[in-house]
Image (cartoon, grey):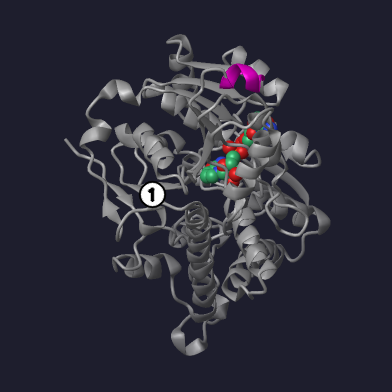
Amino acid sequence: MLRPYIYVMPRCGGRNGMILRLRHLDAVPEVLLRNIAVFGLGYVGLVTGAGFADLGNHVTGVDVDEERLRLLHRGELPIYEPGLSELVERNVRAGRLRFTGSYDEALREAEFAFIAVGTPSGNEGEADLQHVRQAAESIGRAMRPSLIVVNKSTVPVGTGDFVADLIRRSQPRPMPFSVVSSPEFLREGSAIADFLAPARTVLGSVDREAAEKVAQLHLPLRAPIMITDLRTAEMIKYASNAFLATKISFINEIANLCDALGADIKEVAVGMGYDPRISPHFLDAGLGYGGSCFPKDVRALAYMAAEKGRHPQLLQAVMEINADQRRRIVERTADLLGGLEGKVVGLLGLSFKPNTDDLRDAPALEVARRLGESGATVRAYDPVAMPRAASLMPQVEMASDAYRLAEGADALIVCTEWNEFKHLDLEQVRNAMRQPVLVDGRNIYDPDLMARLGFRYDAVGRRTRVDALPAEAGGAP
Ligand SMILES: NC(=O)c1ccc[n+]([C@@H]2O[C@H](COP(=O)([O-])OP(=O)(O)OC[C@H]3O[C@@H](n4cnc5c(N)ncnc54)[C@H](O)[C@@H]3O)[C@@H](O)[C@H]2O)c1
């Protein structure tokens, strides 16, 4: 059987990244079954709560949003995440998972308190910690002694100490407790698989014993566990997201050069990806990153740097390139249509990526806004995000499927690479449109096929803009 490794780094009392002897940690299965409270029942909290319940623990999920609790009590999910509904239902039925609005009820028996509340961007790009603050204070008021508070929210480096301080000051009388940082790396759309088979678990604490207890909870997942100090764990989360965002902006910069020089970004990415130092992941050129994590986390890291008097030039460039991708796709559409005034443009996809209904910082929202500002009528179709989108973008007319979206449209823009868009009957789409213009913001179609089907097709870095080629390269008109 595969055994997980636990690396205890020097910052948490390990010598030179020592590997913990596991005998005492995974010998007795009952030791692993714990009483856990999870605060915040969004994408992270619900998956974490249901996931730990599925491993046999008793989990109480807490949220301050009454509508969210009402839905959960009715057996409905407030978010779309593949497989989550079954996981929640199974564990509620087994009596291992329940939901409440009461911190007191959740903490009565809890040994672990997971904080999984949102940390959105503040006005200046800083992480807004108001929900973390409220959660920490409520925990302090309701906790019993020896609680281990585990922070899963993505929080600025140093927040672990801030949380400890808030809890201490909110306690009705002094009680011992520990704070452990456990940054979350799950991806929406594959969150359950990511919970059950993480690439690694990172834990940070000044209290090595508490960190090892949290490590025990994760042992059934059989992934490497690294234990370091609080600040280092918090930084690992930001550095990981900033690195992934950098990869996306890097490939988009190269894609724009491909457009200018006549190379094909898809093949460039394949050629690069064979190099194990580069890896093929996160080399998809297109509309850029969005969602509830990368944009706010890169901004927050840049803010932390600036606060300390550093100039985060790389992070600034990553954000600028990402913003340009959204602007450029609208300009490309305008070029192909000879202006946007009075044109009907359909958006294929709204969510920031496939398999989620999350619209936070979704590129499609900005694309829709820019199109509307330029005088276009905007329509959209998304397989799951339309109910959420309807209130966020009331001026956008929602279509019931991709073919209805195409009816009478002057252009379609692919904003999200949902599988169902990859297998459309493109002839039917073309025949329904007023003009056969398709701008592929996610590079999901084959440029040659699109040309054969009679589309005026543009993509990102895919030799579709032959006018950019010099005459001697054979591509200029
Ligand atoms: N969504 C992701 O893919 C993802 C991945 C990794 C890390 N994270 C991080 O995890 C954290 C949570 O993200 P999310 O996407 O799950 O957020 P979310 O907005 O989906 O959910 C947050 C939940 O917390 C609740 N809440 C707010 N204040 C509360 C309080 N005081 N007590 C109890 N509940 C409270 C809200 O009502 C909401 O239901 C963020 O810091 C985020 O950056 C998210």
Residue 357 location, x and y as percent? 59, 36
Q: Main secondary structure of the magenta part?
A: helix
Residue 321 x, y percent position in the rendering: 61, 69
Establish whether ligand 1 lies closer than 8 Å to the Cβ of label 1.
Answer: no
The amino acid at mark 1 is Ile
Residue, x 82% and y 56% (percent of image)? 373
Residue holding disc 1: 227
Using the rendered image of the protein, determine whether residue 155 is visible from the camera's viewpoint.
Answer: no
> Quarter of the image containing the C terminus?
bottom right
Left or right of residue 257, residue 433 in this image:
right
The image shows residue 290 at horizontal and vertical percentages of: 60, 52
Residue 398 or 54: which is nearer the viewer?
A: 54
Which residue occupies the foreground of this view, 112 or 413? 112
Q: Is residue 132 left or right of residue 448?
A: right
Image position of 149 with respect to 143: above or below:
below
Give the residues in magenta.
100-107
